[in-house]
């Protein structure tokens, strides 16, 4: 993994030099929440509300 600036949000993230996967604090937080059923439900509900706006 190498550090990489994400220009859209002016934040530092990481990029894998082998596969090109990007990771940043928001991605890590979502992955952590998806590990529990309740966390997954909250993220899905939040995404559905965002589409309605």
Image (tube, rainbow, N blue to C red):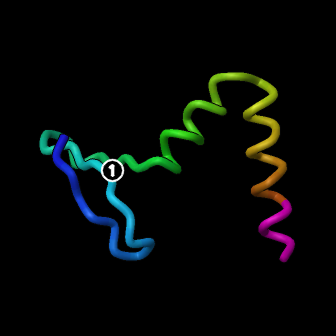
Question: Residue at horizontal 24%, vertical 49%?
Answer: 15
The residue where tag 1 is placed is 22
* Residue extent of the magenta highlight: 49-53
Question: Residue 7: percent from the left, percent from the top?
Answer: 34, 74
Q: Residue at x 49, y 39 (%)?
A: 28
- As rendered, which of 38 and 3 lies closer to the eye? 3
Q: Does 3 lie within the magenta span?
A: no
Which of the image's four quarters has the N terminus? Answer: top left
Q: Above or below — where is 4 with respect to 1?
A: below
Q: How many marks?
A: 1
The x, y position of residue 34, in whole percent, is 64, 31
Answer with the quarter of the image where residue 38 lies.
top right
Mark 1 lies on a secondary structure that is strand
Q: Main secondary structure of the magenta part?
A: helix
The image quadrant of residue 52 is bottom right
The reply, left or right, for residue 26 in relation to residue 40 is left
Residue drawn at (52%, 50%) of the image: 26
Q: Residue furthest front?
A: 11
């Amino acid at each position: 993994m190498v550090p990489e600036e994400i220009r859209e949000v002016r934040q530092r993230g990481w990029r894998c030099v082998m596969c090109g996967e990007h990771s940043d604090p928001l991605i890590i937080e979502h992955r952590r929440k998806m590990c529990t059923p309740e966390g997954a439900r909250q993220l899905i509900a939040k995404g559905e509300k965002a589409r309605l706006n």
